[in-house]
Image (cartoon, rainbow, N blue to C red):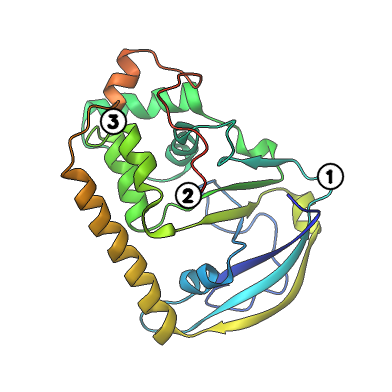
Amino acid sequence: MEKLITLYHGSEKIVEQPIFGEGRMNNDFGLGFYCTANEALAKEWAISSLRDGFSNRYTLDTEYLNVLNLNSPEYTILNWIAVLVEHRLFSIKNPVARRGRGYLTDHFGINVNAYDIITGYRADDSYFDYAESFLNNTITVEQLARAMRLGKLGEQIVIKSKFAFSKLTFDGYNIAEKDQYYVLRKARNDEANQLFLNMLEEESDGLFIQDIMRGGIKNDDPRIPRNISE
């Protein structure tokens, strides 16, 4: 990661001074300030079908920051979903999902609060449904890894620590027009959903969450997809 990076935060308001400790605990990676390096994605995340939004722009000085990149070869797709199940509210539809949640946390969990910033996929809309489908034993880990590339959602960068907040500088904002970016967001989501349905029609003999638990599979197993970033 470069020393100085430009980040964008999509919001319904202008955020000149992000405040450490504010936000929702049940976001993907817990409490933090959620950004992206892609301004177009920030604009998609900023709007609704009824209102425009704002793409807030910042410079982050990453020197001396402890970075967790969940999309690096060091981690697997199961590290990402383990962090997700620890923070997001999943629909647990069967006993396998209940046991799977504990197994993922115990064997693949990461203490995200030990890091200043985190990079990883953003589980919004359909993408959260894919993760939930895996937890409920209806798709394989290989299908989950493929699903997270559908629609080219991209990565989010989350500012976690008070120190990281102090290294963030507000550089201005641009308006995100709902008439343009709601259409783009919906098209991205619709495309991902259709590709996901097409994928489900294919035969899969991969690993379901129940297989992972029965086999006592850990993070070093070569069958678990790594480096999920493209």
Place residue 124 in its image quadrant.
bottom left
Residue neighbourhood size for the residue with mark 3, other residues' Cα within 10 Å, grouped as few (<14), some (14–19), many (≥20): many
**SS for dot 2:** loop
Residue shown at 45%/77% (left/top)? 47
Q: CA distance from mark 2 to mark 3?
A: 19 Å
Q: How many marks?
A: 3
**Residue 26: which numbered mark, if any?**
2
Q: Residue furthest right?
A: 64
User: Residue tagged by mark 3?
Assistant: 97
**Residue 64: which numbered mark, if any?**
1
Q: What's under tag 2, amino acid-wise?
A: Asn
Depth order, front residue of 107/211: 211
User: In the rendered view, would you say 4 is above or below 100?
Assistant: below
- Residue 134: x and y in percent read 30, 37
**SS for dot 1:** loop
Q: CA distance from mark 1 to mark 3?
A: 39 Å
